[in-house]
Amino acid sequence: MQRQGSPPLFRRGPPVEIRLAVMVALSIALLVLDAQFHLLEPLRRVVAIGLYPFQRTVMAPRDLARQFNEWVDAANHSRTENEALQRQRIELSQVTTHAAQLAAENAQLRRLLGVTDTVDQAAVVVEVLYEPADSYQQRLVFNKGSQAGLAPGMPVIDEGGVVGQIVRVTPQASEAALVTDERVSVPVQVLRNGLRLIAFGSNSPGRIEVRFLAANADIQEGDTIVTSGVGGLFPAGLPVAKVLTVERDTASGFARAVCEPLAHPERHRHFLVLQVDVARAQSELQEAETGGSQ
Amino acid sequence: MDRNNSSARQPARRLGTPRNVHPERLAPPANGFFVWGSVLAAWLVSLLPWRVWEGAPDILLLVLAFWCVHEPRRIGLVAAFCFGLLMDVHDVSVLGTHALSYTLVAYGAVALHRRLLHFDLWSQAIHMLPVFFVARLVQQILLAWLAGRWSGWEWGLSVLLTAAIWPAMGFVLQLPQRGTDDVESSSV
């Protein structure tokens, strides 16, 4: 409804169809470039840095309400926490005595074998800023970034075990892919017999898969899977998942194990990011690869 | 402008204006600050975590589409594309995902806007439903192609809800224009 006499305030641009074609072409180019070649990380980082203050501002009422809630519920909360901690303390005291013994023994054996000591991992506590809405990936956004010493590749853990891996960082925020995300793979081994495997995120939500096993591989329901330390990013021995079912396909000769993760990222707000030396792990991996190919 | 005034001016109408058109009874253009303010507010609301539910309506898309229909010279394809890109970064999805579907919806809204203005808000919602659906379908097909799998039809609910709250959103967004006008004449 073009009203008569309306002032020509806006100059007419190109026709809407041409704008549509340009925008759609641009969108598809962005989609392909970002999904296949990862060329747009700088652009994404710039936009994300600009977005961060808005995200924090919008989330502020929620955080405030949460803090208020916690403050009101403090007595109750601290009592249950206290009980849990007491129980844990008793359980742990036994484990600690045992562990101290083992550690001493282990140090001695390492000295005998001439193996260098493992270093204690520095870690950063992070809090979930928000959970992005996307059905194709399982991600979490944390409230700390490269300013807190985070870098892509670092593992994220909670008290249950491995939660995921940092995939992107901006100065103030970071994005982690959960172990159930399709694009994450973790070098693991079966705790029972040391069988080394690779665990992948699964198509079915909330599951981890171990694919392309030999059909006769020794893996059973109920097996616990822990990180193997291969690759250098995930320290060895962190719990990852429990095997739910093993599907053996005699026709193809492969087996596939579906596992349930032991960490529960949906239940917690705080996680620990282990500050592994990502650059060193990658250079070691590259050396191993070039060494293998020569 | 009240009725007495308009009927008094009726004989002196300009040549070429049909008898049944009353230029002064048409809704005045929306205030630019209000248009952009509502889009910004919808964007900020979309940053909140309630969108994790797959059936959640897309408020930002709804407001953008509404202004594409009612103020196509202020909000158009470029604005939709830019806000889509912002949502892509917020949702950490592949860049261009939201940008594409927002652009398609904006085009649908701009292309239909002359027709849509003849209808009331409910009919507009029914017109916009296929636009929302097709735009989202194209987006999902591209994502499925990139991911190598189809993620299901849960987003259909989101599309339905987005169209379903069009009348309510339209009522709210037209409130400032309604203030100066009487009730019957404001269904533009």
Image (tube, rainbow, N blue to C red):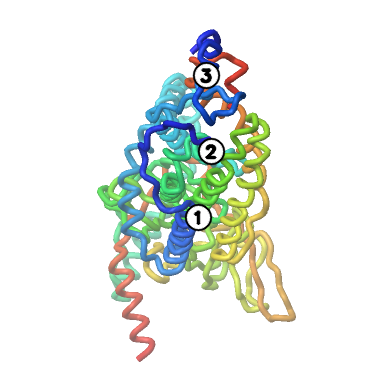
Residue A86 visible: no
Q: CA distance from mark 1 to mark 2?
A: 16 Å
What kind of element bears circle 2? helix
Type of amino acid at the residue the image marks with label 3: Arg
Q: Position of residue A195 (x, y in %)?
A: 54, 73
The residue identified by callout 2 is B69
The residue identified by callout 1 is A17
What kind of element bears circle 1? helix
Give the left or right position of residue A222, taking residue A78 as reference.
Answer: right
Q: Quadrant of residue A199?
A: bottom right
Type of amino acid at the residue the image marks with label 1: Glu
Q: CA distance from mark 3 to mark 2?
A: 17 Å
Kindly give the residue lying farthest to the top in the view shown: B4
Q: Position of residue A14 (x, y in %)?
A: 42, 53
Question: In the figure, B162 relative to B6: above or below?
Answer: below
Contact, mark 3 vs mark 1 (Cβ under 8 Å)? no
